[in-house]
Image (cartoon, helix red, strand yellow):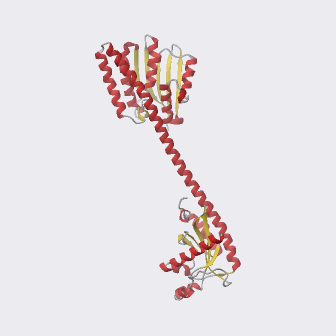
């Protein structure tokens, strides 16, 4: 258990509203102590006799010893102790026991009891020593004398106050533990998200590299050396980007440059079968999106939309900012999908990783979800012989 002490509970408000009120209502002096009897925080309604004694190193030492002896007596008898301190005054000790451990006490007293020998007396008690000081002797005459009945009634009331303090201590620890647990969960969640982002990123990148190298290999086999060199130059630019930008998010502007290099390669490969346009509002260029999250969507449009069409078609990437959201649209006028195919594709977005068929699309969706959580929507629309569109909408905070 953490090492708690009463000082963590004694706010100025608590001192004023609880301890001060109790002290002045009963006429007793009150103070918190630690488990060794040392005063913690300000003292309430201390008499001048005790104030002067505690101003000396010797007096503070003896007060702490008396408090500690009284605390040990209370713990041994499992009830509040009423004890005559080293200076001959009544000393009430209510230990603060939390989770089986004494973390301090509430000390009250600084009164005299009418009935002599009513309570155990500290072995180091010596009135003569303190009363030899004329000023202390005068202050001693000011100390109120109370009946045993009032002293014990006050002890009972103080015991109830102690229960409140222990409950406050328990609540403070509970809040601290909850805050710590929440922080740990948040850190763990962020680490998990980061790990998922990195893993998803690594799933897609080899797939893209394989496709590019396969294209270059085919061109070389056809002795298209100049075209292969152009593709490799563009590919080198893309690899440079990917190697120097391994973070989980990038500027939209940089991602679009990356996609542009990819489309340049595809344009070289397929000529007039592929036409494309990239348009982005200047205000959106500096927004951050998941790294390598657009190229797989563009690749899907080409591989499954435009190329199967025979004569090819057009691909558009349109990034626009509205009053409360940003929108990225990737659309083609390719072969499109039937209703059944579209529903299956939509289902792959949220499917369990083990059952995913459209890995690239699923991974893009998951990366946007991990980065933007509830602030994004990912919509698929398509019609047979009309084309397909992916619309990503991100609500701004």
Q: As drawn, which residue projects farthest toward the left?
A: 226
Depth check, front residue: 245 or 253: 245
- Frontmost residue, 161 versus 61: 61
Residue 373 on image: x %, y %: 52, 36
Q: Give the quadrant of residue 73.
A: bottom right
Q: Quadrant of the N terminus?
A: bottom right
Q: Residue at x 47, y 41 (%)?
A: 191
Residue 268 visible in the snapshot: no
Label tally: 0
Residue located 39% across and 27% down the image: 256
- Which residue of the protein is positioned furthest toward the top in this rendering? 311
Residue drawn at x 32%, y 22% is 232
Q: Identify whether 236 is placed above or below 20.
A: above
Does 12 sit above or below residue 287?
Answer: below
Examine the image and state in which quarter residue 84 appears. bottom right
Name the side, left or right, on which 332 lies relative to 50: left
Q: Please indicate whether residue 13 sits to the left or right of residue 293 in the image.
A: right
Identity of the residue drawn at 37% across and 21% down: 212
Residue 241 visible, this angle: yes
Check the image and report above or below for 363 versus 87.
above
> Measured from the top left, where is residue 145 in percent x and y?
65, 82
Residue 179 location (% of width, % of height)? 54, 51
Q: Position of residue 280 (x, y in %)?
A: 41, 27
Look at the picture and state if 19 lies above or below 197. below
């Amino acid at each position: 258990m953490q090492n708690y002490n009463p000082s963590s509970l004694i706010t100025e408000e608590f001192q004023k509203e609880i301890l001060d009120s109790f002290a002045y209502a009963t006429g007793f002096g009150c103070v918190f102590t630690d488990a060794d009897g040392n005063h913690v925080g300000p003292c309430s309604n201390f008499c001048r006799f005790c104030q002067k004694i505690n101003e000396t190193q010797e007096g503070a030492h003896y007060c702490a010893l008396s408090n500690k002896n009284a605390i040990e007596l209370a713990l041994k008898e499992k009830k509040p102790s009423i004890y005559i301190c080293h200076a001959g005054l009544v000393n009430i000790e209510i230990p603060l026991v939390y989770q089986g451990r004494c973390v301090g006490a509430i000390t009250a007293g600084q009164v005299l009891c009418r009935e002599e020998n009513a309570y155990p007396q500290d072995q180091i008690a010596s009135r003569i020593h303190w009363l030899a000081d004329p000023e202390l002797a005068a202050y001693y005459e000011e100390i109120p004398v109370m009946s045993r009945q009032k002293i014990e009634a006050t002890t009972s009331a103080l015991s109830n106050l102690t229960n409140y303090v222990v409950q406050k201590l328990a609540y403070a620890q509970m809040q601290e533990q909850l805050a710590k647990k929440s922080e740990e969960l948040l850190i763990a969640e962020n680490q998990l998200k980061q790990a998922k982002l990195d893993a998803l990123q690594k799933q897609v990148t080899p797939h893209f590299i394989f496709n590019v190298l396969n294209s270059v290999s085919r061109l070389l086999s056809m002795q298209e050396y100049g075209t292969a060199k152009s593709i490799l130059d563009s590919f080198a630019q893309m690899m440079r980007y990917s190697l120097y930008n391994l973070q989980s998010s990038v500027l939209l502007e940089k991602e679009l440059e990356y996609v542009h290099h990819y489309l340049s390669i595809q344009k070289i490969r397929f000529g007039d079968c592929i036409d494309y346009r990239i348009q982005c509002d200047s205000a959106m260029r500096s927004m951050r999106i998941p790294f390598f999250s657009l190229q797989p969507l563009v690749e899907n449009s080409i591989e499954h939309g435009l190329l199967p069409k025979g004569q090819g078609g057009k691909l558009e990437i349109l990034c626009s900012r509205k009053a409360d959201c940003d929108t990225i649209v990737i659309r083609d006028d390719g072969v499109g999908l039937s209703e059944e195919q579209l529903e299956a594709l939509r289902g792959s977005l949220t499917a369990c990783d083990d059952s995913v068929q459209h890995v690239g699309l699923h991974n893009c969706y998951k990366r946007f979800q991990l980065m933007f959580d509830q602030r994004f929507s990912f919509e698929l629309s398509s019609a047979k012989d009309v084309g397909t569109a992916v619309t990503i909408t991100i609500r701004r905070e």
